[in-house]
Image: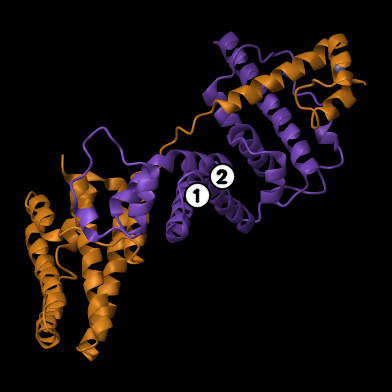
């Protein structure tokens, strides 16, 4: 086995431990050094930790998508935690009030007889908060988390679009149960967006 | 078998005892946001590091990590048991990255050209850094940077085998190449890394001498 053959053989027997390899390595300091260095590299590679941390943008996007796709479902009563958290933010108060109104109607509608529910649902489109305080939200994001600006702007655009679309359907057929549900979902996503911004602006 | 809603509104576990992965999976199946985030937090570094090492690009790595988690979460309802969770996630992440590399039509593994020794791969190749020995330990950051500057095909095999611990037969399956090809690519990747690390040391030695 010569030097070229030894180096080619390392693809098959990586650590140079075959009989033929060992015979060559004993006699050849250059190849011996090469094998040592390759072993060093392999050892160092095995110790490379998974240390890199993704930016918060990644979880934000995942969470947003999971909510949009309905994989994350609201499970705890929203109202107490909402008001406790949102009370801290001056600009969120009117927004929170709007969304709570909308959610309140939604929750109530679920527990009311059908007819009353239909009356109540008429109030939902009236709580048109799709443009409300978007600028404030963006300002809050820019102040606290400038890196997230584009992300929030995009999420906000999407959710406003959903609200507009769902609103359109509800306007056309106010008794369409699915349409009303979609509209509520869209509002809920928007409130989620505000809550995410809120969570991050708290100390 | 399905736990009632009451289970979800019960007080959180006392601090210090983190919910097990199996528990998080079960809660995620029920749509619990915190469970999804808990699973994400447990695995984000490994998945993201994998994506970053394979692409050597922060923005791409973030998009791919996001895609991998989303794909996993969409299938979480079908998942039984926790033991294979990280394996599953990991395999999925690798697939997501490979799909991405293929879309960018980067040579994931160049199949034919590397099976014959080319001039470039000949062992006699000399970078002028041969007198620099890689003695002692190899600096983590230097290795990291050297891995990032490997050609994509070499980088993928090296990351999968030497960093992530995949076997050649698994890599062959994942990358759609032969086992022999995976082995020879890995060897070339290591040789290339050695060159890069030596050049790096030679440069630094030159700087020290000059300064
Ligand atoms: Zn030799």
The orange-coloured chain is labelled A
The secondary element bearing badge 2 is classed as helix
- In-image side of B174 versus B94 (left or right): right
Do callouts 2 and 1 point to residues on the same chain? yes
N-terminal label among 2 and 1: 2
Residue on which disc 2 sits: B55
Residue A165 position in % (x across, y down): 29, 79
Residue closer to the observer: B95 or B17: B17
Residue B67 image offset from top left, x and y in percent: 47, 55
A186 versus B197 height, above or below: below
Give the quadrant of residue A67.
bottom left
**Quarter of the figure with the N terminus of chain B:** bottom left
Pinpoint residue B87: horizontal percent, then vertical percent: 53, 45
Return the residue at label 1: B60
Of residues B21 and A44, the one nearer the viewer is B21
Residue B171 % position (x, y): 68, 44
Q: Chain of mark 1?
A: B
Instruction: Read off the chain for label 2.
Output: B
Chain letter tied to purple: B
């Amino acid at each position: 086995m010569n030097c070229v053959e030894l180096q080619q053989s390392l693809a098959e027997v990586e650590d140079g431990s075959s009989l033929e390899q060992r015979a060559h390595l004993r006699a050849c300091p250059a190849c011996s050094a090469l094998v040592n260095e390759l072993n060093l590299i392999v050892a160092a590679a095995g110790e490379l930790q998974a240390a890199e941390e993704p930016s918060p943008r990644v979880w934000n996007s995942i969470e947003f998508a999971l909510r949009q796709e309905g994989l994350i479902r609201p499970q705890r009563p929203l109202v107490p935690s909402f008001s406790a958290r949102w009370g801290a933010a001056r600009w969120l108060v009117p927004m929170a009030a709007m969304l709570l109104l909308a959610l309140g109607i939604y929750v109530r509608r679920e527990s009311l007889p059908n007819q009353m529910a239909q009356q109540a649902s008429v109030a939902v489109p009236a709580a048109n908060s799709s443009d409300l305080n978007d600028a404030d939200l963006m300002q809050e994001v820019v102040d606290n988390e400038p890196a997230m600006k584009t992300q929030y702007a995009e999420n906000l655009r999407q959710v406003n679009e959903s609200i507009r679309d769902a609103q359109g359907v509800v306007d056309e057929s106010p008794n369409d149960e699915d349409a009303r549900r979609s509209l509520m979902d869209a509002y809920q996503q928007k409130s989620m967006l505000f809550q995410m911004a809120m969570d991050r602006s708290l100390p | 078998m399905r736990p009632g809603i009451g289970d979800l509104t019960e007080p959180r576990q006392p601090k210090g005892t983190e919910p097990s992965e199996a528990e998080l999976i079960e809660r995620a199946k029920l749509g619990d946001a915190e469970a999804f985030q808990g699973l994400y937090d447990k695995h984000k570094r490994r998945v993201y590091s994998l994506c970053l090492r394979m692409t050597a690009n922060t923005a791409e790595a973030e998009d791919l990590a996001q895609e991998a988690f989303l794909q996993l979460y969409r299938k979480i309802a079908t998942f039984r048991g926790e033991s294979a969770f990280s394996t599953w996630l990991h395999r999925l992440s690798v697939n997501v990255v490979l799909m991405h590399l293929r879309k960018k039509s980067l040579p994931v593994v160049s199949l034919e050209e590397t099976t014959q020794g080319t001039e470039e791969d000949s062992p006699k190749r000399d970078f002028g850094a041969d007198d620099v020995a890689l003695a002692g330990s190899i600096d983590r950051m230097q290795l990291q940077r050297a891995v990032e500057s490997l050609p994509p095909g070499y980088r993928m095999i090296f990351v999968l085998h030497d960093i992530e611990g995949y076997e050649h037969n698994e890599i062959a399956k994942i990358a759609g190449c032969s086992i022999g090809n995976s082995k020879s690519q890995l060897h070339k990747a290591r040789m290339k890394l050695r060159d890069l690390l030596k050049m790096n040391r030679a440069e630094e030695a030159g700087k020290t001498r000059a300064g």
